[in-house]
Image (cartoon, grey):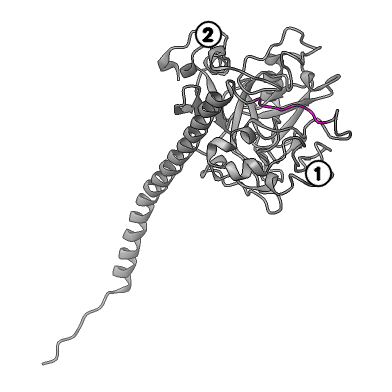
Amino acid sequence: MRRIQRGFTLIELLVVISIIGVLVSLLLPAVQSAREAGRRAQCINNLKQIGIAVHNYVTAIGALPSGKGGSYAHNLPGTPVYARWSAQSQLLMHLEQGVLFNAINFSLPPETPGMAGDVPFMPAYQNPGRENATACRVQVATFLCPSDNAPVGSEWISATNYLGNQQSWACDVSESFPSTVSPGETNSGIFYYMSAVRMQDVTDGLTNTVFFSEKIRGNGVRDNDGRSDQMIIPATTTRDATFQACRAASPLTATRLTSRSGMSWVMGEMCCTTYNHVDTPNHHTCAGLGFPGNMANMPMQIPPSSRHPGGVCCLMGDGSARFLKDSIDLITWRGLGTRNGQEVISGDAY
């Protein structure tokens, strides 16, 4: 007598498919969390590599590189002020990028991408002989956070996620370049215009001072994200006024100065290679227009930001890298941005 083979009924098949779907939905967040943990670990590792480069640079030179190098306008008329080398460019030799470093002619300015958003802003610059054209377009893998999904571009691909701590709200303020709208403003950061900070100048302690942090790169088009779109605010004359104006700005309606944050590691500018401690991580990015005179009077709020849930990765002055939460207290965050503010910061405050 022939046996009859019984197959699955449609209902049984649907039940099995449903069970598989539930299992996948339960496992997917865990898989995504594991992947993000790996990406965050790589981000931390990138910052540690930058930290090693910073300390090796100091050993060789005696001071930290300036966040914004000098202008070339005096010996190459027509060069814009923003065509100046970044701290990142000075660290290349200590990031196993000696060939790239040696390919750069630092007696000439860098080439820069156009940074315009809704208004004319920092048009692309090319030096006459194009000597630095190739080097300025090389992507350095250590400068990219794997969690950031912004495109690095096609013709211009030298992006960066890691910015040096400038600290001050006044864009170019420094010992040799004071603000006239706020004469008492000093820059107690690490990497700023023509800076040459020594390790012994960091009297707040290397473990309590942020040197580098990460920043979401712009997409080149409006994405209504106040962390990457740099919004225009009215010109202000104090840190707190800048903070309040930027907090009040809406990413949905504000005019954008640029949507290309982090587009170039060569530019010693707050659009690409430096940030400040006006507001805590993952808050709005703003620039004030209508300021009088030079960029020492230009108000900026450039907080770190990341695609990591809940905070950003930071490099401290002692070479350690740690994850700082978005919920960090504003006063603590501002204290971590100064090298000599004498703030009392508890180890468990961040």
- Per the model, the C-alpha gap separating discs 2 and 1 is 43 Å
Residue matched to label 1: 126
Q: Which of 116 and 132 is in front in this view?
A: 132
Q: Residue at x 84, y 44 (%)?
A: 128
Element at badge 2? loop
The residue carrying pointer 2 sits among few (fewer than 14), some (14 to 19) or many (20 or more) residues within 10 Å by Cα, namely some
Judge from the rendering whether residue 46 lies leftward or rightward of residue 183; answer left or right.
Answer: left
Percent across and percent down for residue 156 are 70, 49
Residue at the farthest left position: 1
Residue matched to label 2: 343
Image quarter for residue 333?
top right
Judge from the rendering whether residue 350 lies leftward or rightward of residue 1; answer left or right.
Answer: right
Inspect the magenta stretch and tell me whether residue 69 lies in it. yes
Element at badge 1? loop
Which of the marked residues, 2 or 1, is nearer the chain's N terminus?
1
Percent across and percent down for residue 165 are 60, 24
Percent across and percent down for residue 207 are 46, 18
Q: Is residue 312 among the parts visible in the rendering?
A: no
Q: What residue type is labelled 2?
A: Glu
Tell me if residue 1 comes above or below residue 49 in the rendering: below
Inspect the magenta stretch and tell me whether residue 107 lies in it. no
Q: Residue at x 54, y 14 (%)?
A: 202
- Magenta segment boundaries in residue numbering: 66-72
Q: Which of 99 and 312 is in front in this view?
A: 99
